[in-house]
Image (cartoon, rainbow, N blue to C red):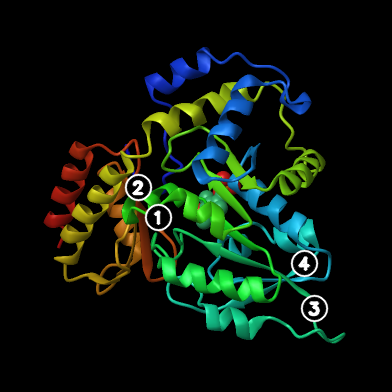
């Protein structure tokens, strides 16, 4: 099976499994799991943040961050395509009791002027604006990367209004290798960052939340309340350490694969608008005699899985378990489609 549905469809590599076997483990709820502690320290150092918290999923680390930054009845500013808004089961309302001010923007990326205009005045009629969330890369935006200047401008608006800035960096490593940006710049610009290890990094689970000592102390308490305090989590944290050491640079290969597939697709008359392919995600329209479902069903017969994500669009994602041979086979089959 050649599975392009998501970069979550990866299996641990032999090296990763070996790393799991060698984990020392202890009880992480007591702060005594050496591999969890090592992973948290590694990630904090990598992004130049004071502290980190290992979480079971990216949804949980985003939700924890939002809960720590807000009070019930507050308003969170994010894109109308943000994962925290459309793909976390209404978690912002459920977990934090906060509401969302969803902004339109280019491919899920919002701008500093739009953020400034959406901040509510100090008025009893209005919800208190208490957080701004960005997503980089933007999932629903086809894996696009923010311009650094825009992030700096949004940071300035947040500082003027004393608003914390959170980054849903589920695929931040993809953005880093695609743009060559310094991870420590992200650590400086954002009050908190959530980074997934279960996407292109190839881990079976896990995400890391980064922030100040105080922020992470509060986050640890929320993680416990959500039932996310795990015991011998080191078996899983060991996969994160392994991925940090072995799977960051190779993301460039996923990006290359995505571009190769894009090129083949764009030669077909039944492929409509495709979002610019900046990292490992392709989102494109299927038109004419083909529908996204028909396209997906056709490829499935060839053992290739893709995901229809709207009545007109298909998503394909490249990752660790997609080999050059698989990309070649996929391109071959697409080029023969009529
Ligand atoms: C996948 C994803 C998450 C979190 O996903 P989990 O499956 O809960 O780990 C968060 N944000 C974005 C943009 C994502 O793509």
- Res 230 → quadrant: top right
Of discs 3 and 1, which sits in the foreground? 3
Apparent side of residue 212 relative to residue 154 in the rendered image (left or right):
right
Mark pair 4, 1: CA separation = 31 Å
- For marks 2 and 4, the one nearer the N-term is 2
- For marks 4 and 1, the one nearer the N-term is 4
- For marks 3 and 1, the one nearer the N-term is 3
Quadrant that contains the N terminus = top left
Q: Is mark 3 within 8 Å of ligand 1?
A: no
User: Which residue is tagged 2?
Assistant: 4
Tell me what residue is drawn at x 32 percent, y 53 percent.
Answer: 178
User: Which residue is tagged 1?
Assistant: 307
Tell me what residue is drawn at x 63 percent, y 20 percent.
Answer: 34
User: Which residue is tagged 4?
Assistant: 98
Of discs 4 and 1, which sits in the foreground? 4
- Expressed as whole percent of the image width and height from the top left, the position of residue 152 reads 50, 69
- Expressed as whole percent of the image width and height from the top left, the position of residue 123 reads 83, 86
Mark pair 1, 2: CA separation = 8 Å
- For marks 2 and 3, the one nearer the N-term is 2
- For marks 1 and 2, the one nearer the N-term is 2
Tell me what residue is drawn at x 60 percent, y 65 percent.
Answer: 133
- Expressed as whole percent of the image width and height from the top left, the position of residue 313 reads 37, 67
User: Which residue is tagged 3?
Assistant: 127
Mark pair 2, 4: CA separation = 34 Å
* Relative to 55, residue 136 above or below: below
Of discs 2 and 3, which sits in the foreground? 3
- Expressed as whole percent of the image width and height from the top left, the position of residue 20 reads 51, 18
Mark pair 2, 3: CA separation = 41 Å
């Amino acid at each position: 099976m050649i599975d392009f549905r998501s970069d979550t469809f990866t299996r641990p590599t032999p090296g990763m499994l070996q790393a799991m076997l060698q984990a020392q483990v202890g009880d992480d709820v007591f702060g005594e799991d050496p591999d969890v502690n090592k992973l948290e320290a590694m990630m904090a150092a990598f992004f130049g943040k004071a502290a980190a918290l290992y979480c079971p999923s990216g949804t949980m680390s985003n939700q924890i961050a939002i809960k720590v930054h807000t009070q019930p009845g507050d308003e969170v500013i994010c894109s109308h395509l943000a994962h925290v808004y459309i793909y976390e089961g209404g978690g912002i309302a459920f977990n934090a009791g906060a509401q969302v001010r969803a902004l339109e923007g280019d491919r899920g990326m919002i701008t500093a002027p739009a953020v400034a205009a959406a901040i509510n005045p100090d008025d009893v009629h209005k919800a208190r604006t208490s957080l701004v969330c960005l997503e980089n890369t933007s999932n629903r935006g086809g894996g696009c990367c923010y311009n650094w200047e825009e992030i700096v401008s949004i940071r300035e608006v947040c500082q003027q209004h004393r608003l914390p800035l959170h980054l849903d960096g589920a695929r931040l490593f993809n953005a880093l290798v695609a743009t060559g940006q310094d991870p420590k710049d992200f650590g400086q610009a954002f009050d908190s960052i959530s980074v997934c290890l279960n996407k292109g990094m190839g881990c079976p689970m896990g995400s890391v939340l980064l922030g100040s000592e105080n922020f992470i102390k509060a986050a640890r308490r929320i993680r416990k309340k959500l039932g996310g305090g795990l015991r011998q989590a080191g078996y899983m944290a060991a996969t994160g350490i392994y991925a940090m050491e072995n799977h960051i640079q190779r993301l460039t290969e996923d990006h290359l694969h995505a571009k190769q597939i894009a090129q083949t697709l764009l030669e077909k008359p039944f492929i409509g608008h495709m979002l610019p392919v900046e990292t490992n995600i392709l989102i494109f329209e299927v038109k004419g005699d083909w529908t996204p479902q028909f396209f997906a069903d056709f490829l499935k017969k060839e053992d290739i899985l893709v995901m229809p994500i709207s009545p007109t669009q298909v998503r394909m994602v490249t990752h660790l378990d997609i080999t050059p041979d698989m990309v070649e086979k996929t391109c071959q089959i697409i080029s023969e489609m009529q």
